[in-house]
Amino acid sequence: MSDPKRASDTPYAVDVESGESYYWCSCGQSQNQPFCDGSHKGSDFTPVKFEATESKTEYFCGCKVTGNQPLCDGSHKQ
């Protein structure tokens, strides 16, 4: 599997809504960061589903190397 493209050096703050599903881009190619737009087609990457259990701000990974997909774990600092 190839490495993902680093889409951002910082996380994306997103106000999520309880009960909604979000599909995080794992390849880094999406023009709709941090969410999937289908740019991964033909690659080994697939989007990661995130289901919001409450309405709040979540921080989605922008560097694409988090160990806590799809949320930021600070990996972009290394």
Image (cartoon, rainbow, N blue to C red):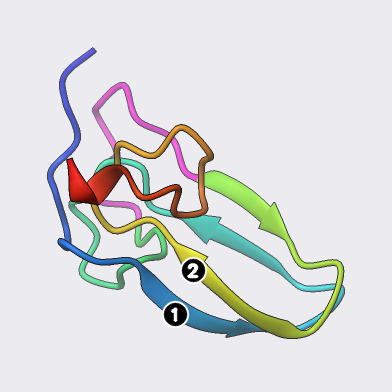
Please provide percent x and percent y for residue 50: 66, 55
Front residue of 31 and 38: 31
| 73 in the magenta segment | no
* Amino acid, disc 2: Tyr
**Left or right of residue 32, residue 35 in this image:** right
Q: Start and end of the magenta stretch?
A: 38-47
At 25% from the left edge and 27% from the top edge, which residue is drawn?
43
Q: Is residue 44 one of those drawn in magenta?
A: yes
- Residue 21's place in the image compared with 19, above or below, is above
Question: Exactly how many numbered labels are in the figure?
Answer: 2
Q: Is mark 1 on a helix, strand or loop?
A: strand
For the residue marked with disc 1, what is the amino acid? Ala
Q: Position of residue 27 (x, y in %)?
A: 26, 41
Q: What element carries label 2?
A: strand
Q: Name the residue under label 1.
A: 13
Instruction: Quickly name the residue at label 2.
Output: 59
Q: Which residue is drawn at 40% across and 58% down?
A: 36
Q: Marks 2 and 1: in contact by CB < 8 Å?
A: yes
